[in-house]
Structure formats: structure tokens, C-alpha cells
Amino acid sequence: MKRFLRTIMDENVPMDEAFLAEQERRRDNNLSDQIYDVTAWSLPHMFNVDVNRCNNLPNVERVKSGTEYYAAGTVSNPDATVAYIVPWGQSTASRFLTNALRQGIVVKSADMSFVTGERRYPAGSLVIEVKANDADLSEKVQNIAKTTGAEVVGVDSSWVTDGPSFGSGNTKRVHPINVAILWDTPTANYSAGNTRFVIERQFDYPVTPIRAADIAGADLSPFHVLIIPESRSGYKSTFGDRGAETLKDWVNEGGTLIALGTGMRYIADPDVDLISTRREYAYREETKEEGDDTARVDGVLYESKDDFMDAIEDHNANPDPVPGVMLKADVDLEHWLTAGSAETLNVLYRGSDIYTPVTIDNGRNVINYAGADEILTSGYLWEENRVQLAHKPFVISEPRGRGQVIGFTADPTVRAYLDGLNLMLINAIFRGAAHSRPTR
């Protein structure tokens, strides 16, 4: 049991140095690595929670407790006369939101933290006004809290001493929305399935699958959100020019488009240009100069094997693929997309995709990987990838027309086991739609 607990709870389990040296040798010779799956397995990182280690059995009476822990599944002041507030940031609050919307409850969400009474509520907190809902609101709220485990606080005053008031433009209504996801070829079936599982099974909200091959002629007007999962072969040839125009028109009219992982390649393609970021080649300190188109070239001296290895590099190559590591990312807490988040998150990074940041006039780099010296939290990362990934975006938000384009440069729903990133997906879906201005 000790070994099992160490395996799943340790922040990092290093691999044998000789094995890693062999992987580096193989990489230098353009051979695939022999690493199975990801190099980082750590539940604390995947759940984005802090873990305290103790070296002996703790006395239960001494276990820390206090106001920092939520009293889940409760409704204080169930007969509130003004509103019910659900503190945002926990999965229980996300499930409360989805269930409330499905039961026709009118819900608002604050873009910034606020203080009412003697308590500060985090950005994203739900506000359910009594006057905007039916007479049986109290009963519904109590039932939903019980089934979802959410904490709900009833208030008898709308007086806010700091932050946006309940009627502020910074407290937006979250509407019941129709969510669609691309399905079938060429989507990566695991990515599509994992994402749909997280939304439907973990957060109780229905998702409509749309065959990717049907996008070109699809009527997307009934949907508020469309999710593009990862793809192994790409979407460009499947969608064609007509499909690209369908997506652009739909977003411009108020749709929220969310791309995950390699699904970003499509929306960032210059020919599609749904988002202004671009995928990077591998960084090289020196680039090749274009020579004359002749049968002979100038002679070159190699003083070392390192010179030779540099000469045979492909200077237009992609970064080397990474088996899978946990990386630290810094969060812009002033953006509505990060409501309820911690200041830093752990992200599972796999593959070779690295994207440029968007400029401030086009959008926001909402979550960015940390600097090179602190980016790696668990696993083994190629040195070149470590320095090139530093400060590059993980989540990008870019308004387009009346809608939104949100890109996750790494898939946040891998195997549906990255619970610590679920909040970002829920924010992208529901808060993204709330910040769009659909014409319908």
C-alpha cells in the first residue's frame, strides 16, 4: 500500500538516468523514444490540489480544519428574500450551475470577486435572484445543492461593499445553451469521447455530436457552443472552404468556438485564420542562409561532432514530440475566462505543438506556461522544448464579431482524468457563451 500511495501521490517519480541518456541518444539520431505513455503521474498535479506529507500517522484530532474548507451540500438561510449565492471554483458549483439551467432557473455570474455581508465571493460566483425566479425557487435550490454537493448562501440584502453589484454589467446572465461537439472522422475518438464524458457524465449537461463531414452544409444556428476536439489527420480537407466560411459566419453571429489540443491547428491555419496565434517550428539559434542554386556549395569545416549534428538538423522541423509531462502555467485572474481559478495550474503537455502568443489588440493569452526555470513540475522534458515552451500560451481567448474563439493549446480533457482543469472547460463553455452576443 505504501508503494501504491507513493506512486500516485508523489509529485515526481524520476526515471533511471541510464535509460534517459539512451533516449537522448536515440533522439539525436532521429529515432523514436522508448518511453511508454506519459512521464508524469501525479494525482495532486492532475487535480491541482495541494498535498501535505506527514512521516507518521496523524492524530485525527489534530488534523487541520477551518473556514478554508467548504461545507458542501448546504443552503444557509434557505428562505432568503433577495438572492442565493454559490461560491465559484469547485466542481460542485459547476454541477449546481448545469442542473439549475436545466431546471429553468435564472442564473447570473459575476466577472469579478465581490463582498456582501462579511464574506468575499470569488469571481464567477453564481447569483440567483429571488425576484427573477418562480415561487418554488427555495425548494429547487435546496434539492440541487443536495444532489450536487454545492454550498449555497442565501442573502437578504443586495448591498455589495466591494466588486460588482447583482445588477451590474459585470454580473452577466448565464443562459441555458445548446452545446455541440465534432464527432466521427477526422476527430480523435479518444479526445471527442473524453470531452463529451466530462461534460455529460461529470457535469450533467447534454452535448450534441455533429459529424465533422457535415459541417460544410450544417445549420449551426441552434447551437451556442461548438467544440473542436483533437484530430490526428486534421480538419482542413474535411471542411473545405465552405466549412471554414460556415464556422466564421456562425462565430461572427455570436457563437463560441472552442478548440482543444491539435484541434487548434485548424483554427490557427493561416488559410482559415479563426484565431491569430500560429504554430511554431522548433527554435534554432542559427538559421540556414539560402545559397545559389548550383551543383556545388562552399566547403565547411566540422571541428566537433556537435558541429556535425547541428549541420544535419532540419531547420524547418517541428519541436520534438514530448511523451507527456506536467507543466506549470500562470493564470491571468483578471479575465472572465479564469473566474474561480488558482493563480497557477498544472497542465498535462504532450506532443510537439507550441503556439505564439496573440497580440493584445486581437485577444488575451489567458493562461501561459511559466518561465523555463520553473515550468516543469513532473516528468521528463526535452531541454529544447523546455526553453521554447516558456511563457507560451495554454489558453487563448479572442473575440470575433459577436462571438468568441477560445483555444486550449493542450487538451484539458485527456482521459477525463485532469479534474484540475475542468473548471477552465466549464468556464469556456458557459461563461464564453455568456460573453458572446448572439443575434438569435
Image (cartoon, helix red, strand yellow):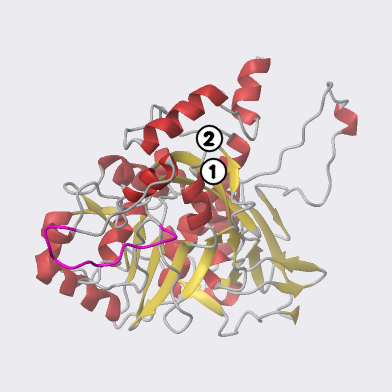
Residue at figure coordinates x 26%, y 54% from the top left: 208
Instruction: Tell me the SS state at disc 1.
Output: strand
Residue at figure coordinates x 50%, y 29% from the top left: 20
Quick one: label 1, few (<14), some, or many (20+) residues within 10 Å? many
Q: Position of residue 333 (x, y in %)?
A: 62, 68
Question: In terms of depth relative to the viewer, which is nearer, 121 or 279?
Answer: 279
Quadrant in the picture for the N terminus: top right
Instruction: Tell me the SS state at disc 2.
Output: loop
Instruction: Specify which label sits upstream in the sequence, 2 or 1.
Output: 2
Part of the protein shown in magenta: 283-296
Which residue type does callout 1 highlight?
Met
Which residue type does callout 2 highlight?
Ala
Q: Position of residue 16 (x, y in %)?
A: 56, 23
Residue 359 seen in the figure: yes
| Contact check, label 2 and label 1, Cβ < 8 Å | yes
Q: Is residue 168 left or right of residue 385?
A: right
> What residue is disc 1 on?
326
In this rendering, the answer to whether 412 lies above or below 435 is above
